[in-house]
Amino acid sequence: MTAATLPRTATGRFWALAAALGVVVLAGLGAAHFMEEAGHAITGMNNRIVWGMPHVFAIFLIVAASGVLNVASVGSVFGRTEYKSRAPLSGLLCIGLLAGGLAVLMLDLGRPERMIVAATHYNFTSVFAWNVFLYTGMFAIVAVYLWTLMERRMNGYSGAAGLAAFVWRFVLTTGTGMIFAFLVARQAYGSALLPPLFIVMSLAWGTAVFLAVQAALYAGSDRTIPPEILRRIRNLLGIFIAAVLYFTLVYHLTNAYFAKQVAFTRFILVDGGVYPLLFWGGFFVLGSVLPLVLIWHPRLGTPRSVVAASLLTIVGAFALLYVFIIGGQAWPLEIFPGYATSSTFADGTIAAYAPSLPEVLLGLGGVAIALLIAVVGLHVLPFAPQDDPEARAKASASA
Amino acid sequence: MSEVNTGRRQVLAWGAAMAGVALAPGVTLFELAQARSPEEAASNKVRWGMLVDVNRCASDCDACVTACDQENGLPQTKTPTSAQWIRKVELKDLRTGATKSAPVMCQHCAEPPCVDVCPTGASFKRADGIVLVDRHTCIGCRYCMMACPYQARSFVHEPVTGQKPEVPRGKGCVESCTLCVHRIDRGGTPACVEACAASGHKAIVFGNLNDPNSELSQRIAELRAAPLRPDLRLNQGVRYAGI
């Protein structure tokens, strides 16, 4: 181990952290078991809000998994050496987040024990079926990519593997966005803007997760993140947050322009209760404006404010997904245009939804699975960023 | 002028009668061949569908809903998590304030979004146009419920009791109106249609959309019935008149 190498997690701290995460994973599994035994009636979900809190968590984790690989891509695809030393951590987090997200998605199924059916019966007109291949392919490609990065004899192939992972994650996030873009009759969805929106969301949220985990790693050692690296990744995060804001703005502007979408847009942005509150307070102020100030204010941009910006971006991500997924379903389907409707099936009304404890525990269990994979990986293999200040100084002097 | 040979006419008449008797079973067999035996697969020669005449549907009547619940062993209590294969929707015209009432169930689309999005192929359309869920391959992902424009599908949120042998159900799967496929395959009509007729309203007509001479096709033409959300171009099997 060189002096510049981050120390692997100390054994005592590793076990404490792993045990704490293990408890959360167990709580999540217990919640899933309870949901399967008693049925989804014990959750806040119903026949109107069919995707609830577990989907907010799962989609965050899957989208962030794609984006967290961004740091590795900048290293391998765009040849920035300072990012290259962070590529293994980036790949490890990708696998962890993807595993956590998929676990939540699978355990929330009505029949989770039928995963073998999903793996053996494919309907190729379904974007869900495509995603089964995209997600498993992502695991395989990132595993190979990590191998080329960490096995010296395979280093020569890391560029090609990095490029494959780079392309694959764009396709994967496009597929995730298409889950919603392909919904023909829901006013919140069915827009070609959603796949690119999901791609920029992945870049912002993945970078935020990377920065937060990296900060936690460095906090556990006596070393500090090299300032120029922090500055670069910090700027990337800022650009990505601004891009998410831009796409979200265009999405809502388009909706506000179409007469048939005005009432829905008004609901989400103005008078829909918890949804406008989460959109403006959670996503806009806390999750976008504040992080941008923390990153680019001349007196800020310090390591601490960058961590705060990253955590706030993650908070904003959850707020935005809640509004998008739950708010989008809460708005009633327009089955009889020109009529006000009512029925025993909540036609014409805003659907009620209150997240239940098992749903939240299942979601947190997914987050814990992601972190546990990262913690174990970091403990047993040299995934932590290996900075070599002397080599970098030489490189910058010769440049 | 020669006399009419009645004897020869008699012979011709008997001959024609004999030929009729000889051919009749063949004709009958031909008709029988067009019908479907229980072992035979559904055929696209027919497309089952329904007409809802909203002008005949009474706001205070829910005979179709009760009949559906009884026929299919569905819960009688209506909650946000209970299965509702058919529901009465009360309509108020936003322009005139006039009120109407209409039953809404699976529209049995020819281009069903639920079938398109189903990852395992559990949601499928039979050759005769009936859209169903295969309870053995449904994993309970609820993507079909997100995709359905009519909110016609229900997720089984709780353990199921009181199942009917002909209508298997199960916790964790998605389900919807089967058009009473078990009755249709025996040559019957859906329970809601029968109950509506028994109540005296006759607001729901069932039949073969492929047959221009069927009562269904003729009533659809006469009443200029249209599908719900025709802009989606899903070619629904259920049409509405009076909306």
Image: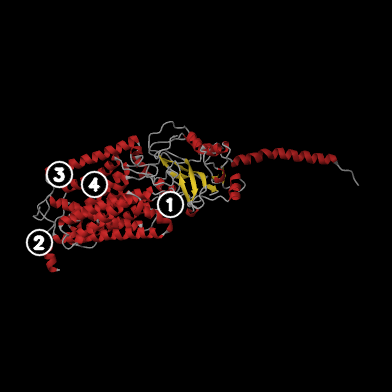
Q: Residue at x 91, y 47 (%)?
A: B1
Looking at the picture, which amino acid does disc 1 mark? Ala
- State the mark number for residue A370: 4
Percent of width and height locating residue A314: 24, 52
Left or right of A29? Residue B149 is right
**Residue on which disc 2 sits:** A390
Q: Residue at x 11, y 46 (%)?
A: A10
Of pointers 1 and 4, the one earlier in the residue sequence: 1
Report whether residue A319 is seen. Answer: yes
Q: Secondary structure at mark 1?
A: loop
B19 or A301, which is in the foreground? A301
Looking at the picture, which amino acid does disc 2 mark? Glu
Q: Secondary structure at mark 2?
A: helix
**Residue on which disc 1 sits:** A185
In the rendered image of this protein, does residue A69 appear above or below residue B183?
A: below
Looking at the picture, which amino acid does disc 3 mark? Phe
Q: CA distance from mark 3 to mark 1?
A: 49 Å
Q: Which callout, 2 or 3, points to the residue nearer the camera? A: 3
Most distant residue in the front direction: B97
Q: CA distance from mark 2 to mark 4?
A: 34 Å
Q: CA distance from mark 1 to mark 2?
A: 59 Å
Dot 1 alpha-carbon crowd within 10 angstroms: few under 14, some 14 to 19, many 20 or more: some
Of pointers 2 and 4, the one earlier in the residue sequence: 4
**Residue on which disc 3 sits:** A14
Marks 2 & 3 on one chain = yes
Of pointers 2 and 3, the one earlier in the residue sequence: 3
Of pointers 1 and 2, the one earlier in the residue sequence: 1
